[in-house]
Image (cartoon, rainbow, N blue to C red):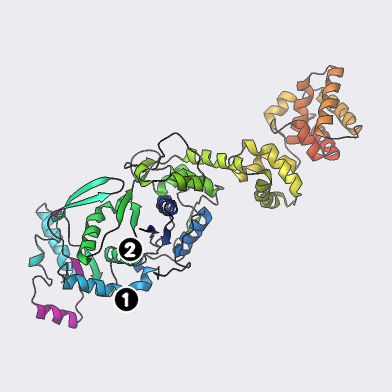
Amino acid sequence: MTVRVRFAPSPTGPLHIGGVRTALYNYLFAKKHNGTFILRIEDTDQNRYVPGAEEYIIEAMNWLGIPFDEGVGSGGELGPYRQSERKAMYRQYADRLIENGWGYYAFDTAESLANLRKQCESEKKTFVYNHLNRNALENSLSLSPEEVQARIDSGTPYVVRFKMPVEELHMVDEIRGHITQDTGLLDDKILFKSDGMPTYHLANIVDDHTMEITHVIRGEEWLPSMPLHVLLYRAFGWEPPKFAHLPLIMKPVGKGKLSKRDGDKMGFPVFPLRWTDPKSGSISAGYREDGYLPEAVLNMLALLGWNEGNDREMYSLSDLIDAFSLARVSKSGAKFNPQKTKWFNQQYLQNYSDEDLALQFAPIVKEKCGQNPSAEFLTRVVHEIRARATFVHEFWDLGAFFFVAPTEFDAKASKKQWKTTTNDIMAEVCTLLEGMDVFDSASLSTRVKGWIVEQGHGFGKVMQPMRLSLVGAPQGPDIFDIAEMLGKEETINRIQYAMQTLKK
């Protein structure tokens, strides 16, 4: 069997990271078994369609590095891969269900069904359209064939419902094992409407079959639909795929599924890319725009519900492909940890070369101060500050002094380190620096430290004010590395500016 899996989102808004994880697990499973990963856009619900959502989904998957083999915009022999473009084919399958007794026409109006629900509520019951009452409602099970045809010919609105059998249905889920369902408790779902549009259930099953899907790997929220889908395969006489329902991603705090509201409240993204709502104009944060690396996001998501069976945490995409199996996916929900996501990003950031990070830092420097430093200089700056960063955008706060001289100085450090004698000492340091022909870190360290010992000043009286002069705060890498990178003239200018500013 050639493995074929699909990720089938609806274009109703941005892609939640729960959906991203579903896409990732499908991708890993496909690649593990040398199979095919398909993207299908399920847009049968045109009322909920949101412009730009489909493009967002594709862009997000490309950014994350989990591209699809077949799908919208990518081609494939079993398309089209957008459900709205497959509309004409669904009617024949609805007709087939009616012909073989698995489906029936229902003409009940929304008003009549609402009245039945109210009546049941008044009796403290729940109305369910099923085997207990369907023969007494307005459908082709209770009406004569002539009356049914007459209503259809006259344009009376109808739906096609599935005739749910009454039995103990036995199913197998690749993650959850054996599942039993009393189908007598289920309703007769609507599969097709007289406007020619299928509902999710019919379209989903027909598409999975005609696209030769072998494994349906989807979220836990679809587990209640599994009995209907298994029975639809039986009704059509098709071999069903294997089903695997993934656990939910849970809130960091409290109970329930992770939502956008949790991210807004706690300050972390729940979408891969930034999303601007076309109706309200509201903007939701995205992992990409917040500075996360796609490798870190994938590694984090892979471990939200799956574990190889050890304590390993760092996996490249190829590592994940080799290690992944549905047998190691958990049945219970996985609690999301925003701090752990940052940790993953820091780990991956430190794996990048100085040169790669310098390329990412360059546009930030340009935006902040209008400078275009050389690649060599940027690379060295990155080398000096990277260990303290989680995101590339933090490089500016860590190393802005390499590009812009401080005009203000840390108040607490100034009060503590700039004494009445400091100006005299710094003036001597400037004279010392002026006389140096070789201005590199090693030479500076040897000459300045030797001079401090000779003069008996004490290292704190010289080194701390010098750092405050060059950086503006008591932080940063080795002070002599900073001085070398700034150069003799800029180093002396900064010390003299600090002397003028802090002497009072």
- The residue positioned farthest toward the front in the image shown: 1
- Pointer 2 and pointer 1: residues touching (CB < 8 Å)? no
Report the quarter where the C terminus lies. Answer: top right
What residue do we see at 85% from left, 37% from top? 488
What residue do we see at 42% from left, 61% from top? 38
Q: Which residue is mark 2?
A: 208
Mark 1 neighbour class, 10 Å CA radius: few under 14, some 14 to 19, many 20 or more: few
Number of marks in the rendered image: 2
Magenta span includes 167 = yes
Question: Residue 195, how many percent across, how many down?
Answer: 27, 75
Question: Residue 96, how many percent across, how many down?
Answer: 21, 72
Question: Residue 172, how many percent across, how many down?
Answer: 25, 50
- Spatial separation of the CA atoms under disc 2 and disc 1: 16 Å
Magenta span includes 36 = no
Quadrant of res 413:
top right
Q: Is residue 276 above or below residue 357?
A: below
Quadrant of res 255:
top left
Amino acid at dot 2:
Asp
Q: Is residue 102 left or right of residue 276?
A: left
Q: Which mark is residue 88?
A: 1
Q: Which residues are magenta?
A: 142-168
Q: Is residue 34 left or right of residue 173?
A: right
Q: Is residue 107 above or below residue 278?
A: below
- The residue positioned farthest toward the top in the image shown: 456
What residue do we see at 18% from left, 79% from top? 152
Foreground label between 2 and 1: 2
For marks 2 and 1 on the same chain, the one whose residue lies earlier in the sequence: 1
Q: Is residue 29 among what the camera can see?
A: yes
Question: Residue 360, how many percent across, how many down?
Answer: 65, 50
For the residue labelled by badge 2, is the local secondary structure a helix, a strand or a loop?
A: helix
